[in-house]
Every structure is written in structure tokens, then in C-alpha cells.
Image (cartoon, grey):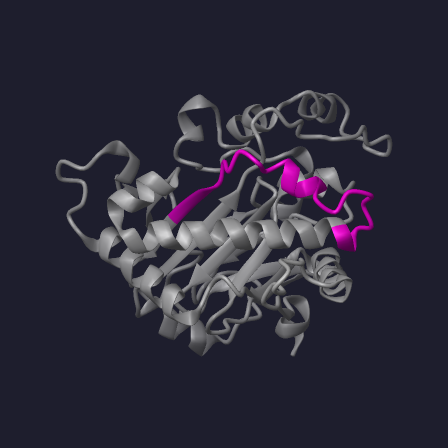
Amino acid sequence: TVAEAMAPLIRIPEPSAAGQPPQSKICNELVSAFQKSGFLRISSPFLPISLLKQAIEAATAHLVSDANDGAAPCTEVVTHPSDPKSYCMLMSKEDAASVSPTLAEYIEALEKTKMLVLHCLAVGLRLPDPNYFCKLHSENNSSLRLLRYPATSEDTGNRCKEHSDYGSITLLLTDGVSGLEAYHDGKWIPVPHEEGCLVVNAGSLLESWTNGKIPATLHRVAGPTSESSCSSKQDLLDAVGRDRTSLAFFADPNTGVKAVLQEDEGSDNGDESEKVAQMSVSEYIRWRSGGADGDAKRSGLAFTTEEEGRVQNGGSN
């Protein structure tokens, strides 16, 4: 299908007894998928179906509980200011463990999976050092966002507004409830769900680092009245009748790494490009999230000039 072609499924094999990373064939397939749409799906040897199911259950239990009564700020469930959803941002494995041992185990498996994907990226892009991207993520600055979209009415538009992610890669687990769409070839295409697999998409830092060869694709969680959706209307109607849980793992690089690794001479964004090029990763994330206050909540308020145009042209709801 068009959806499966946009986000192909790549099964990363179990590492060999000698600990060898995936073969170049798998790496080439992964990079080809990234370059085509910025989206793919993977199965990871570190993430059995049982752990994925338990992670969804643990996240849902926390998001629907009265966890904010006396809870530490690091595990607080927050109502989103504009989208009909709530979320909790876990900034470390320790934060996750305070919510559920399962989520701490899940983060540990995600860190291993993240390194597999980053290794494949370097190999597939023919970089001299196959561990180039892994070295940029040695501080484990990743974070896990638990998200809950409560059931809502049939006249609902976007349950999550159009946006692109701003780290390097995002590893997303969903409970299978429909709605996730990516903007590809001028259309909002549904991202297929496969049990036991994660959705992987590129963030704007990876797009910058690869000089646009890998796009940070706009995506959203659509509802029945979202504009220009290629999803089945019945699927979206069924989806808003159910609560929806997802877990987004943001792989942020080391804080001192530059947002732009090499000058992009072909850029025509003027002062904005130069400003971004001088930022460290931590500064860039703060800018993309709307300033110091938005940084902790990952609100994603800021867009580059180019991204603003893509949102407008993509038919935001």
C-alpha cells in the first residue's frame, strides 16, 4: 500500500554472538527509507512484544491515575495547552523507574535500539566512522514522553497538531489506535501500525546534519474532521471513540554538539540559518520549544521559516 511504502518495515536482526552490528544491507534499507519520507517502522531484538505491551499498560496506568497528588514534578501529568491530550515527560531512567520499573526497563531497551539505528545511519550514509552518530549521543540525553489522547467527539479535528520533531530521531510506540499521519508527497498519509514494532522518524537536527538528505517530516494525530486526510474516515471515527496511548522516545544528542555540523552553503534562510548554525543542541532545543519555560515541557512552539511554510502548505486544521 501507499502507507506501507511511505513507512516501510525493517526488521533489525539479533546481534551476532560476537556482538557484530547489523549488516550493511539492513543499514542501506534503513537509510533509503529515511531519505524517502523521514519515516519507517522497525522491529528491534531488544524490544520483545511482551515488553512493548507492558510499557503501554504502565504508561496508561500512570496517565489516568491521580499521580499528581504529591507527585514529584518529574512525573507530573500535564494537560497540553492546545491539543486535546495530556502527557508526562520522563527525562531519565530514574524518573521512569519512579513511575514504573517496566518503563525503566523499556528505556534501557530503547537506548540500545537507538544506538543500533544511529549505527545503521552512519553505515548507510557511507560515513568513514560507523559510530559517528553514536558518539554524538554518548551522554544518553534521551527522554520519554507518555501521551494520552482521551476519547472525544466525532467532530474532532487534529488530536495532535502538525509538527516536526527537533532532535535526531524519535522512536514511537503506539497502542494501535488510528490517527498518526505523515505529510508525504503533498498528502497526509496514515502511518501503519504493526504489533511488536516501533515507528521511527527523523528530527530537524538529523535533517540539518545530513544537509536535507533525510527530511524531518511533518506529522500529526488526525481526527475525523482533519483536513486533507488520506486515512479511512471510519478508522478515524472509531479512533476518537477510544482513549489513545503512545510513548515517544526523543533521542537528543550530547548538549555541546552543534545544531549544524557543517555550514550549508545552499541555504537561503539568511540570519535565521546563521543563528541556528551557532547554537549548541541544548540551545537549539530551547529555541524550538519556545524558550526556557517551554524547554522542560517540550511544547514545540517554534518553527523555522521553512517549517512554517510547510505547515501552512500542508493544510493545517
**Magenta range:** 123-145
Query: What residue is rendered at 67% in x and 27% in y?
Result: 258
What residue lies at 57% left-to-right and 31% top-to-bottom? 254
Is residue 126 within the magenta segment? yes
Q: Nearer the viewer, residue 289 or 60?
A: 60
Image coordinates for residue 215, horizontal then vertical, percent: 70, 49
- Say whether residue 81 is visible: no
Magenta part, dominant SS: loop
Q: Is residue 74 left or right of residue 82?
A: left
Q: Is residue 217 magenta?
A: no
Q: Residue reaching furthest right?
A: 265
Question: Residue 279, percent across and down?
Answer: 64, 22
Q: Residue 106: horizontal and vertical position, in percent? A: 40, 55
Q: Is residue 2 above or below residue 72?
A: below
Q: Position of residue 95 (x, y in %)?
A: 32, 39
- Please say if 277 is above or below 144: above
Question: Residue at image x 28%, y 52%?
Answer: 101
